[in-house]
Amino acid sequence: MQKLPTGISLDTISDGYDSGRIGEAKSLRVYLDFFWKVGPKTLDELLEKLARSGYPIDCLICDSFMPWAMEVARSFGIVGVLFLTQNMVVNSIYYHVHLGKLQAPLTENEISLPAQPPLQLGDMPSFFFNYVEDPAFLDFLVDKHTKDEEDYGVEQVRDEECIKWLDDKPKEVVVYVSFGSMAVLEEEQIEELAYGLRESGSYFLWVVRESEETKLPKGFEKKSEKGLVVPWCSQLKVLAHEAVGCFVTHCGWNSTLEALCLGVPMVAMPQEADQSTNAKHIEDVWKVGTKASVDGKHWKTVAANAVGEGGTMAVLYMEAVVVSELWKLGMTSQLDHGDGSIDDSASTPIHFFRIMLPHNLLQGTLRLPTRFVSKYGKHLSNTVHLKLPNGAEWKVNLEKRDGSVWFQQGWKEFAEYHSLAYGHLLVFRFNLTSHFHVSICNKSCMEIDYPINKANHKRTRINSEDIQPPKTQKTTQNKKKCNSNFQDTAFDKKARDHKGRLKNPNEGKRNMEAVGNTSFTVIMKSHHFTLGQMYVPHAPIKSCIKSGEQFVTLLVGDRSWRVKLRNYRSKSVSYFTTNWSAFARENNLKKGDACLFQLLHCSDNMVMKVSISRKMSIS
């Protein structure tokens, strides 16, 4: 018997595989079956030995997934105590099984428990749909973090390598991927993860056990500028590191608790045991992550599609980024909790978000989430209204087909006008009167600059002589109070030049007539100054945009600035970058100012005239 410095003694029982442990078994099921046969016998022998030694056991504490240990305790007449190592919701499920209120295998499609949201079959612990003994108790037998003494130095070096690699990365940009010590992924799953992570172009730290490394695709680099694959790391240290932005996890309870405590958003990919129940709460109750919707058994059929643009892993990564950004902005508390407390204001909870995928743009449709339709479908009419922060309101028809509800007629025009591109994020708030409040963010989760529309807000006024929207804009006037961050803003009726001097009030109108529809207006926001760049919508200048970079001459009065326009044509995104800060500074631009950009010339050197209207406070 080994004596520890603290006075605690350690001893062992046999699992039947003393020389090679679990590696000797042909499968996990074979291991479990054999351990359940020999475990009670060897525990009985240990208690007998301790009783003969003069140090009999008074109390036996065991993991709840080894019920046979409680039988052994009763046979010795000693107290047995269960140490519950899973989510209390899982304990509640087991309790209802004990009461006979739940039967395995389940026949109901939906289960209701006190103080819990409705649970689907896939949200239950795995033994309900596999009807086999739950293997999660192995987490008790195999310490996830303790290594043999002879390996400690090696693992310390590996741990230091991970932290050093993370130290060189920006804040909250690294995707950490780990499936614990026991989960065994199929080769197709490993391949999909590998290609998905690589094609995403994002930083990632991926823990792949040595026994799983042979499943990595041939030629996949274990260490690169973007990614690092390791056999082990100190998970707490990694999750606590400021470079980590999200956690792709199997949702083991230890991993879930660590991520919750350290504030790391999760992409849930449950494998077995209680992990599906944990994933349900990560997504729908705690609102701190998103759940992968593809069943592990079906990954092989989707692997080929998953690694392309809009594929499974690309979407999962973008969803992880979205959750991470919502977490950082404190917006997770705004997600709909299902209590029905919904109003027509900016405080309306977020009901769902959608990431733009290629088929959304090519087909000109967008599917509403099934759960949203199930809950709020009775409040939807054939025509709905999409209301944006700038007051614009778009009519879009709904179509029901293949058991789903889609934004149909009007959606394509909405997407084209706002230059929606692959990876753009749309956040939807629903007010129960067929009106959706919609916010649009680019791939960096930064809200775009919306075009000014015709809306006559009660508390926002824009001089029609200075700033007008493109005539092709298909919007209706918003007759309700605007709930955007522009609601306390108004603009001078007279535009000013780059020194703040008053300009001819009719100049903006004449300019608008001269350029027709090739114009757009941007309201200045804080990030236009702090980041030194400005988002440029593609629709008004689409015919002039080139691949890569080009220079644009911006004219204000008799002065000009040469500003670089960086184009991402495949993503329909452009930004003013180099010299934009100088333009903003020398024209004394402030947050809330409105800039009307009018295209005058489109050739090797694009020329735009800029009319500026200054923000003024309402008394």
Image: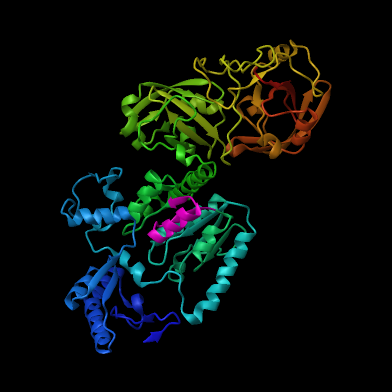
How far across and down, in percent of the image, does residue 571 sit? 58, 38
Q: The C terminus is located in which quarter?
A: top right
Residue found 24% across the figure and 44% down from its top:
112
Residue 404 can be seen, yes or no: no
Residue 462 percent location from the top left of the image: 64, 16
- The answer to whether one can see residue 542 in this image is yes
> What percent of the width, then of the height, locates residue 371?
34, 37
* Magenta-colored stretch includes residue 248: yes
x and y percentages locating residue 524 in the rendered image: 67, 29
Q: Quadrant of the N terminus?
A: bottom left
Q: Is residue 460 left or right of residue 58?
A: right
The residue nearer to you, when weighing 340 against 364, is 340
Residue 103 position (above or below residue 380)? below
Question: Which residue does the image show at 39% across and 33% down from the upper left?
Answer: 368
In this rendering, the answer to whether 468 lies above or below 210 is: above
Q: Taking 510 as reference, is 176 left or right?
A: left
Q: Is residue 395 left or right of residue 598?
A: left
The magenta segment: 245-267
